[in-house]
């Protein structure tokens, strides 16, 4: 699981049937996470996050389980919105 910032949205009118009705957001891992992949990621969102928010993102089978979509083609999911972080400074 990583901490990331929501930096955009994705709109897809044609998609896998298991993804219909879901919201997709573009997230960017915060540098303080030392996450190997510093690139932006498209993640499914079922917690109601918005652009500019800091979120928790999980990957792989944990992402599918975390959003209740075990049989869907999901590799990244937003599973929480961060309210506060202690002892770490995240720069904008």
Image: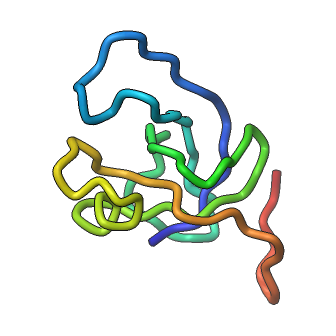
Residue 36 drawn at (x, y percent): 38, 61
> Looking at the rendering, which quadrant does residue 7 occupy?
top right
Q: Residue at x 61, y 65 (%)?
A: 80
Q: Residue at x 49, y 40 (%)?
A: 40
The structure's colour scheme is rainbow
Q: Residue at x 54, y 50 (%)?
A: 46
Residue 55 drawn at (x, y percent): 64, 60
Q: Residue furthest top?
A: 13
Q: Residue furthest bottom?
A: 87
Q: Quadrant of the N terminus?
A: bottom left
Figure check: 54 above or below 62? above
Q: How many marks?
A: 0
Left or right placement of residue 31 versus residue 85 in this view: left
Front residue of this view, candidates 80 and 17: 17
Left or right placement of residue 15 versus residue 45 in this view: left
Q: Residue at x 78, y 43 (%)?
A: 52
Left or right placement of residue 83 versus residue 66 in this view: right
Residue 51 drawn at (x, y percent): 74, 38
Figure check: 46 above or below 36? above
Figure check: 47 above or below 14? below
Figure check: 38 above or below 73? below
Residue 87 drawn at (x, y percent): 81, 89
């Amino acid at each position: 699981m990583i901490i990331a910032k929501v930096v955009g949205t994705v709109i897809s009118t044609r998609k896998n049937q298991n993804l219909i009705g879901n919201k997709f957001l573009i997230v960017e891992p915060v540098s303080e996470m030392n996450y190997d992949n510093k690139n932006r990621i498209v993640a499914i969102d079922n917690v109601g996050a918005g652009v500019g928010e800091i979120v928790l993102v999980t990957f792989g089978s944990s992402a599918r389980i975390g959003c209740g979509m075990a049989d869907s083609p999901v590799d990244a999911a937003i599973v929480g919105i961060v309210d506060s972080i202690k002892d770490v400074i995240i720069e904008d």
